[in-house]
């Protein structure tokens, strides 16, 4: 193996291993701060530079908080239940982190310093998108492993919930991505991103919009974010599968969860939001990295907002939503997208607009119809008063 | 599940198919984020469905009743604060009401007004934080709870200015109140009461028609009118099951007959968690109405009647009760002529409302059991005493 | 050179995983060892530049079959296998003989008649090509397989439901 190859691999992968954990630290701060503002609180605002004499003097809006959290996590005791499966208990958080980190390299993220080198980025893989889904699915195993190895009933319930939920939501997730793959005719992430240059983002087409909404909802379930955070539902099953985790193992789970959040948002950006496309990219190519990460953060901001405002679904409602609403809608979306795309190839101008409006109407009507069919019979009620 | 009181239909079907499944026994509590204290539910689960539930309590037992039988009447007043520690004012009132029946003390009018004001403020505190906790149990990340606590703080400030304590007020005395409210307190109270409806509007807009809240709470934890009556359920929970029963209207104790207010209750078709949630939301509006009238009608005068220096009632049995925010709170006292009660018994609404927990939870999902418990509105200090 | 190292490492992992999967008493450990085997196999596919197959290997075998196995195991008792029962059945000798026979009859000819490396170079393993192949010459095979799988799925659902005992009040969710 040549030294050049090793160097290139390092240059291509190390940024991923440095940038995303750093962003993770920043995101925990951002989430705490944003949730605090939603809840009329201030959030972390004291920690400056931990372990120095400037710890409390320059608080910098509490930006040192993630660092302090990390240090705290590192020094906490590692508690393993007596009856736990010690090996699996140890492996689970590691296995949770690996797939999340691994899929990052399928994102068409180009760093300015890699341009002059050999193109070793894994996103040049022909089937990057399908690899992405295959490897994200491994996360389920880690969660099950943690739930089973802890020998705790809450953990087990959380693990079972996680498996059922992630398998169910993977289907609409993949099916909504299929639309984009059909449009581009490639599973290559970089090609998909390039196909959306010049504001031809897929989210601006009717089927792309529908697919994006389905994808985003399903991805919330896939990474256990509110309102689909049933595997770790605090008010029901304590902390779900990581009830019995403490210290650094817990931190690894936490890290894995956030990295998965970046990864799936990154895929959403690649598939629907034009990848690194944005104003000024033509003049300054490195801006595309900035745009890519900015778009990821836009999606994450929505996730934080949802977490601060929505209650949680029940397990049967969650399943029903995936199988009775998202799945039929995403299948219909594929069909609509196929026909409409072929029809608009020949058409131009006014006819194209008509096709788009028709697609929007069909999708909207189906969504409404499915909603009416599946909606539990709930409505606000009237109450009587006694004088 | 079609009916909540029948044993989960799925469970029997599984057994009939010849598939042997074992139930998962989970001991939820006493250390659990949403059992509202040290309460335990021994739950048997078939998958996620509750097939059996056994409430276990007593972890917070403090011997309240026996303690009170071994000290003078007045000395147990501060202990009543610790029953339902959210609503010390109404606890005080119920006890004072019972003791006043023993010796026939006249309560001055200003004291009666202040008692009503304190009780209704307490009701606001209780309901607003209950709704917050309830939505918290539904899985919202504490946002409604923190909104509720912001309002609760304002009322607790009022309590602190009047009695010196935020939660353990110990403010009532036999024949009136311990002290008059400080100067300017009534204006501050009017200010708080005038602003409260704005908060309620916001709260209702955010919560009452939220799709997830509707579908999580409607049809969950149904309590039929008949069961509610025969189990002795009281308070908002009874009214949510469609029974128009409010002790403020029935007994007309104190000066409640002077105020115009309405009692919201449901049509009694379901009596589910949503009804219990909504009845409390609506009750808050009525409490504000009472508060406005009371704050408008209050006059000057003493706040403590001519209570005897040594409280030594003749032998008698009395029962004093009020409409506490959680239901009927009653104190049953037997006097034997000594300065100590011969028997001192509390009728805690939390405990009695809790008795139907199993009936409401069977056949529901485990996540529902949590919100059903939340909708009952218990405080373990009162359940265990 | 690096491909050689990768091949031997992956093969060793695959064989070890398969052995552990067979020998472990603890069923869950066994399943996870099996998944390691699947993962190593997918790595071998990657070495052969068959990345689509590799992805499908992970997606189907680890993501679906493995999880199905876990689900099935969760429904059984004695997961940890701590009761001192025998691991091998009494007919282990004949089992070995059958395995050897299968190896000799099926695999030896295949190994001996490996296509020359030039032929392997000519194959285009890209996803697009695979897609076209599936849609053009193999479309009937694909459809028949799909039909078979659907039939199996429906059959499984019917079998799992069993004989329905008629009930007055059918619970509806």
Image: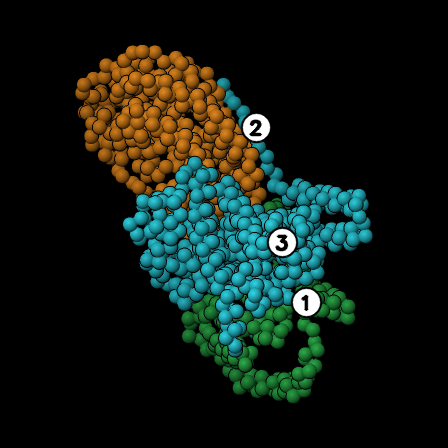
Q: Mark 2 and mark 3: span between their CA atoms? A: 59 Å
Q: Chain of mark 3?
A: A
| Nearer-N-terminus badge (2/3) | 3
Disc 1 designates what residue? C127
Q: Chain of mark 2?
A: A
Question: Which chain is depicted green?
Answer: C
| Chain A drawing hue | cyan
Asked whether the beta carbons under mark 3 and mark 1 sit within 8 Å of each other, the answer is no
| Chain B drawing hue | orange
What residue is drawn where x is 30% and y is 52%? A52
Nearer to us in this view, A101 or A236: A101
Q: Where residue C164 sits in the image (x, y, percent)?
A: 63, 55
Nearer to us in this view, C129 or C78: C129
Tell me the SS state at disc 3: loop
Nearer to us in this view, A1 or A107: A1
Residue B115 image-quadrant placement: top left
* Mark 1 crowd level (few <14, some 14–19, many ≥20, 10 Å Cα): some
Asked whether the beta carbons under mark 2 and mark 3 sit within 8 Å of each other, the answer is no
Mark 3 vs mark 1, foreground winner is 3
Tell me the SS state at disc 2: loop
Q: Mark 3 and mark 1: span between their CA atoms? A: 31 Å
Residue A189 image-quadrant placement: bottom right
Q: Where residue B282 sits in the image (x, y, percent)?
A: 49, 27
Q: Chain of mark 1?
A: C
């Amino acid at each position: 193996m040549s030294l050049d190859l090793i160097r290139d691999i390092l240059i291509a992968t190390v940024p991923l291993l440095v940038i995303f954990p750093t962003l993770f630290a920043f995101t925990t701060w951002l989430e705490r701060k944003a949730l605090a503002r939603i809840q009329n609180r201030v959030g972390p605002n004291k920690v400056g530079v931990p372990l120095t004499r400037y710890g409390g003097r320059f608080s910098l809006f509490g930006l040192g908080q993630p660092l302090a959290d990390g240090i705290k996590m590192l020094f906490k005791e590692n508690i393993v239940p007596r009856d736990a499966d010690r090996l699996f208990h140890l492996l689970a958080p590691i296995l949770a982190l690996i797939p999340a980190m691994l899929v990052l390299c399928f994102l068409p993220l180009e760093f300015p310093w890699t341009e002059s080198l050999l193109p070793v980025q894994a996103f040049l893989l022909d089937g990057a998108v399908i690899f992405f889904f295959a490897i994200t699915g491994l996360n389920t195993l880690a969660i099950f492993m943690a739930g089973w190895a802890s020998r705790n009933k809450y953990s087990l319930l959380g693990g079972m919930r996680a498996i059922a939920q992630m398998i169910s939501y993977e289907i609409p997730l993949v099916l909504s991505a299929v639309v984009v793959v059909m449009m581009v005719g490639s599973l290559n992430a970089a090609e998909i991103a390039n196909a959306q240059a010049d504001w031809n983002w897929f989210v601006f087409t009717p089927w792309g919009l529908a697919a994006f909404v389905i994808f985003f909802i399903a991805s919330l379930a896939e990474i256990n974010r509110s309102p689909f955070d049933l595997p770790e539902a605090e008010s029901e099953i304590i902390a779900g599968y990581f009830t019995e985790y403490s210290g650094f193992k817990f931190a690894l789970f936490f890290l894995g969860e956030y990295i998965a959040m970046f990864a799936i948002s990154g895929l959403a950006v690649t598939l629907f939001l034009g990848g690194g496309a944005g104003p000024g990219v033509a003049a300054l190519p490195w801006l595309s990295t900035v745009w890519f990460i900015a778009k990821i953060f836009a999606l994450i901001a929505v996730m934080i907002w949802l977490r601060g405002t929505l209650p949680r679904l029940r397990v049967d409602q969650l399943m029903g939503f995936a199988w009775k609403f998202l799945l039929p809608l995403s299948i219909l979306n594929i069909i609509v997208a196929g026909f409409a795309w072929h029809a608009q190839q020949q058409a131009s101008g006014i006819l194209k607009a008509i096709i788009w409006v028709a697609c929007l109407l069909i999708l909207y009507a189906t969504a409404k119809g499915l909603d009416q069919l599946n909606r539990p019979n709930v409505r606000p009620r009237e109450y009587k008063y006694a004088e | 599940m079609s009916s909540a009181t029948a044993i989960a239909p799925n469970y029997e079907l599984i057994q009939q198919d010849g598939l042997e499944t074992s139930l998962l026994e989970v001991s939820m509590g006493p250390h659990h984020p949403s059992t509202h204290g040290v309460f335990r539910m021994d739950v048997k689960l078939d998958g996620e469905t509750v097939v059996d539930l056994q409430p276990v309590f007593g972890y917070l037992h403090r011997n309240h009743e026996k303690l009170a039988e071994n000290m003078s009447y007045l000395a147990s007043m501060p202990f009543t604060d610790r029953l339902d520690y959210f609503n010390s004012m109404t606890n005080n009132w119920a006890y004072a009401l019972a003791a006043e029946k023993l010796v026939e003390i006249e309560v001055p009018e200003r004291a009666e007004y202040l008692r009503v004001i304190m009780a209704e403020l307490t009701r606001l505190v209780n309901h607003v934080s209950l709704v917050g906790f309830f939505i918290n149990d539904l899985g919202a990340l504490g946002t409604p709870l923190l909104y509720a606590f912001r309002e609760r703080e304002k009322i607790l400030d009022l309590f602190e200015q009047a009695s010196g304590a935020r939660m353990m007020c110990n403010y009532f005395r036999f024949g009136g109140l311990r002290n008059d409210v400080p100067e300017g307190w009534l204006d501050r109270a009017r200010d708080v009461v005038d602003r409260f409806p704005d908060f309620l509007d916001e709260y209702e807009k955010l919560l009452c028609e939220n799709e997830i809240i509707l579908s999580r709470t409607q049809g969950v934890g149904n309590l039929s009118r008949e069961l509610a009556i025969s189990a002795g359920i009281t308070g908002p929970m009874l009214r949510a099951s469609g029974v128009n029963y409010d002790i403020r209207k029935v007994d007309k104790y104190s000066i409640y007959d002077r105020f115009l207010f309405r009692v919201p209750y449901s049509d009694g078709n379901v009596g589910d968690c949503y009804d219990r949630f909504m009845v409390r939301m609506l009750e808050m509006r009525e409490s504000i109405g009472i508060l406005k009238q009371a704050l408008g009608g209050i006059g000057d005068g003493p706040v403590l009647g001519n209570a005897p220096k040594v409280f030594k009632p003749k032998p008698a049995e009395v029962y004093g009760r009020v409409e506490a925010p959680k239901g009927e709170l009653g104190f049953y006292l037997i006097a034997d002529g000594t300065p100590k009660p011969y028997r001192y018994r509390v009728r805690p609404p939390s405990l009695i409302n809790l008795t139907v927990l199993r009936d409401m939870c069977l056949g529901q999902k485990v996540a529902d059991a949590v919100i059903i418990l939340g909708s009952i509105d218990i405080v373990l200090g009162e359940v265990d005493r | 050179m690096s491909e050689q190292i990768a091949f031997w490492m992956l093969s060793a992992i695959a064989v070890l995983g398969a052995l552990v999967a067979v020998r472990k008493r603890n069923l869950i450990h066994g399943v996870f060892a099996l998944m390691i085997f699947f993962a190593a196999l997918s790595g071998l596919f990657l070495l052969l530049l068959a990345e689509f197959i590799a992805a499908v290997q992970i997606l189907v075998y680890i993501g679906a079959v493995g999880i199905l196995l876990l689900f099935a195991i969760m429904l059984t008792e004695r997961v940890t296998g701590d009761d001192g029962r025998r691991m091998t059945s009494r007919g282990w000798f004949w089992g070995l003989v059958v395995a050897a026979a299968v190896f000799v009859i099926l695999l030896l000819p295949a190994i001996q008649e490996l296509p020359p490396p030039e032929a392997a170079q000519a194959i285009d393993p890209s996803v697009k090509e695979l897609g076209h192949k599936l849609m053009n010459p193999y479309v009937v095979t694909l459809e028949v397989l799909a039909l078979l799988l659907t039939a199996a799925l429906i059959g499984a659902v019917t079998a799992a439901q069993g004989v329905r005992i008629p009930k007055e009040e059918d619970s509806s969710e």
